[in-house]
Image: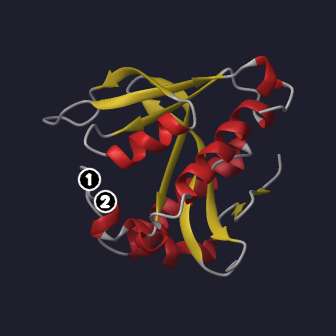
Amino acid sequence: MPQQKTTSRLILRRPTEDDVTSVFAIYGDPATNRYNPAGPLADRYQAKSMLDRWLQHWAEQGFGQWAIVSQDSPDRVIGFGGITLYGYNEIERINLGYRFAVSAWGNGYATELARAALEYGFVELDQPQVYAVVRPAHQASINVLEKIGMRRIDELDDVPGQAPSLVYQATRTADVRQGRD
């Protein structure tokens, strides 16, 4: 499996141990966790633990979360995202997810990454469906998922004491299977 993918403006690469500072900067920022019931990461130890889980997923599955950089600034990570196996309570699904630094918001990067990840899931991983979970108040992410053609199909009671998350799905078409998005 390719460990790097490019879009018109982004480079999506396998993360490395050196990305721990960027993981903490993005996942430790309260603004990027506004809709995350768990809240921001508290310290670099939590960031290292998260990064280690991502690297283990790559080692076991051959795919996973990418470190996202712009082609204009390839040394600065602006986000993390991609396709992973994710537990929907007892069901494991191919899941699209992402998180971007506040400085990257409003540039269409989430949509660009999401389209690339969806194509990757269908073409490279040969998956019939790709799923995504989003908190019901996170309208910006809902907009991204709908813009790339995902449809809301269900709810997931994944956060005790809070409104269920929304489950989105995209289904591979014959055109995507043949690499003609």
Q: How is the image coloured?
A: secondary structure
| Mark 1 Cα shell of 10 Å, populated few (<14), some (14-19), many (≥20) | few
Q: Which residue is mark 2?
A: 33
Q: Amino acid at mark 2?
A: Asn
- In the depicted structure, whether residue 128 falls above or below residue 181: above
In the displayed structure image, the side of residue 62 where residue 143 appears, left or right: left
Q: Give the quarter of the image for residue 174.
A: top right
Seen at 70% across and 25% down, the residue is: 127
Counting labels gives 2
Q: Position of residue 96 (x, y in %)?
A: 55, 40
Label 2 – label 1 distance at C-alpha: 8 Å
In the displayed structure image, the side of residue 146 where residue 10 appears, left or right: right
Seen at 70% across and 64% down, the residue is: 9
Q: Position of residue 92 (x, y in %)?
A: 51, 27
Q: Amino acid at mark 1?
A: Ala
- In the depicted structure, whether residue 166 falls above or below residue 12: above
Pick whichever, 152 or 56, lies toward us.
Answer: 152
Please tell me the numbered disc located at residue 38: 1
Furthest-left residue in this view:
161
In the displayed structure image, the side of residue 123 where residue 104 appears, left or right: left
